[in-house]
């Protein structure tokens, strides 16, 4: 049986081969490899796609978060609230800025930051003399967080919201696209992302002119009128022209790919809801389905993953250890001293299944059949 | 080709081998020379116009003009001339002639 990958980038490559090759060669022939019109043109299209006023490309999604924190002048003494059930980059950038990440639990059904746990974390931060400063809301697996509740809390406590949309560019919340949901949004074009390039890439989206101008300076060594005029301490974080050219071609078919992802996710949910816990998408949001993640709590998750692997089906565990339990982060404060129970439970039970827009029905049926079989057999023996 | 022209070129000692990633000359009438060459289609660059200690980003460190006199003087006199492996002998002669037009040749 042909192996089924978690993400099949070659299927898209096959579809776009001529266009992508043309785009890459165009950049090589122009010999303009850093920034330039390919990048500004891509930024314009990216902003148009999501309805943000400014899109600023940078080297990767982590830098997008870092640049946002630098622009907000986050520093020592500031508490920045992050969900603990996320990739390390979310909290890493806070610590790099010498601010303090304060970990917050997530909601059991959407996997996103829990507003009640956030309120508890704000109290914890105040109790240890940190200034509550901002929230990094992660749109996990492609579904936007609860920006309405977060917005109310942010307003009450004077916090900014940075949307960590590394997985959710293209998703919507209450009729608005990701990119318009927070003051600043950071996204990633890592190859396996719904909109991915052929290497590292990222972008910041904002409607705020002053923030956009500041980030444009920060990403090029704190430049002023030119790059040999240094008005602030910045970093070197630009998107390669060749990646911008690739992304332009992919953006042209992105809406269609998002629809395919939605169809595939729906098909999984229709056929698996009676044997495992399927992802819940609130009726106010749409997801990009960067990952289709089930919760296996009726039987042994690791045995199910092993069984699928034996049938040639790739899966992934996003994420096996919540950040507050990681060696590098366990000393940072958290909403609840004894632990963050939802995240800890999810880390033991989540399993992400193959998901990409070119997953055909016959291949998906192989996954579905095997998950159903394993759910039945693991249950009996566990 | 530039012998006798009042421009200082990088010197390579017998025990050095330079990549010449930048071929940096020095002369007193740098801006005039750069403008003239630009008018003739010859691209040159100044790395760097402003030393780090005089950049706005370094203001908080309390640096002042005159603190690093050699660096400050170099920022006013340096000019990187075209230098790469695809440059032909004719190109080099053309550039040198135009440099001489501006700076003249001593006796």
Image (spheres, coloured by chain):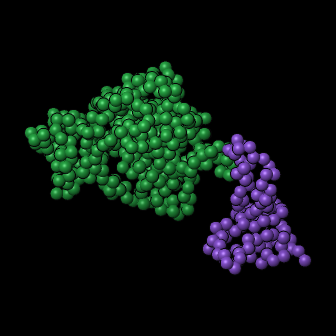
Chain colours: A green, B purple
Depth check: give the residue in front, A380 or A48: A380
Quadrant including the C terminus of chain A: top left
Residue B99 % position (x, y):
79, 69
Q: Residue at x 56, y 59 (%)?
A: A32
Residue A275 seen in this snapshot: yes
Q: Determine whether B13 is above or below A340 in the image.
A: below
Asked if residue A251 can be seen in this view, the reply is no
Choose top left, top right, bottom left or bottom right for residue A20.
bottom left
Where residue B82 sits in the image (x, y, percent)?
69, 68
For the point 56% across and 39% down, the residue is: A70
Give how far across and how far down residue B92 sits, in percent: 71, 74
Measured from the top left, where is residue A181 in percent x and y? Answer: 45, 31
- Judge from the rendering whether residue A137 lies leftward or rightward of residue A311; answer left or right: right
Give the residue displayed 71% in from the left and 75% down from the top: B12
Farthest residue to the right: give it: B107
Task: Look at the picture and state if B25 lies above or below A69.
Answer: below
The foreground one among A60 and A364 is A60
């Amino acid at each position: 049986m042909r192996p089924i990958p978690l993400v099949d980038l070659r299927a898209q490559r096959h579809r776009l081969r001529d266009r992508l090759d043309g785009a890459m060669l165009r950049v090589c022939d122009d010999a303009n490899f850093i920034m330039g019109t390919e990048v500004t043109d891509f930024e314009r299209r990216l902003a148009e796609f999501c309805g943000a006023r400014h899109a600023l490309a940078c080297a990767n999604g982590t830098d997008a978060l870092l640049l946002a924190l630098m622009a907000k002048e986050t520093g020592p003494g500031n508490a920045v609230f992050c969900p603990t059930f996320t990739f390390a980059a979310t909290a890493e950038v806070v610590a790099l800025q010498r601010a303090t990440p304060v970990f917050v639990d997530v909601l059991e059904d959407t996997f996103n930051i829990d507003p009640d746990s956030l309120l508890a974390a704000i109290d914890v931060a105040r109790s240890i003399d940190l200034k509550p400063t901002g929230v990094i809301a992660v749109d996990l697996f492609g579904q936007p967080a609860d920006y309405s509740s977060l917005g109310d809390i942010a307003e009450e406590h004077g916090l900014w919201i940075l949307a960590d949309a590394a997985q959710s560019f293209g998703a919507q919340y209450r009729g608005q696209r990701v990119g318009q949901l927070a003051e600043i949004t950071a996204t990633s074009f890592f190859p396996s992302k719904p909109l991915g390039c052929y290497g590292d890439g990222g972008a910041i989206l904002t409607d705020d002119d002053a923030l956009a101008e500041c980030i444009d300076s920060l990403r090029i060594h704190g430049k002023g009128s030119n790059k040999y005029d240094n008005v602030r301490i910045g970093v070197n974080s630009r998107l390669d022209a060749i990646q911008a050219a690739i992304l332009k071609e992919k953006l042209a078919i992105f809406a269609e790919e998002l629809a395919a992802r939605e169809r595939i996710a729906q098909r999984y949910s229709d056929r698996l809801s009676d044997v495992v816990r399927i992802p819940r998408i609130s009726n106010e949001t749409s997801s990009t389905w960067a990952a289709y993640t089930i919760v296996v709590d009726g039987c042994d998750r690791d045995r199910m993953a092993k069984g699928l692997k034996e049938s040639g089906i790739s899966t992934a565990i996003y994420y096996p250890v919540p950040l507050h339990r990681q060696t590098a982060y366990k000393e940072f404060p958290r909403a609840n001293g004894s632990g963050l129970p939802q995240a800890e439970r999810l880390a033991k039970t989540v399993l992400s299944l193959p998901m990409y827009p070119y997953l055909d029905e016959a291949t998906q049926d192989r996954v579905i059949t095997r998950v159903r079989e394993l759910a039945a057999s693991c249950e009996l023996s566990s | 080709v530039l012998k006798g022209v009042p421009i200082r070129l990088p010197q390579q000692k017998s025990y050095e081998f330079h990549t010449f990633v930048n071929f940096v000359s020095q002369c007193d009438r740098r801006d005039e020379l750069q403008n003239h060459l630009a008018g003739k289609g010859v691209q040159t660059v100044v790395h760097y116009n402003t030393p780090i200690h005089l950049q706005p980003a370094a203001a908080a460190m309390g640096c002042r003009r005159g603190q690093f006199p050699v660096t400050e003087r170099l920022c006013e006199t340096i000019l990187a001339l075209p230098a790469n492996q695809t440059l032909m002998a004719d190109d080099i002669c053309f550039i040198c002639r135009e440099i001489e037009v501006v700076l003249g040749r001593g006796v």
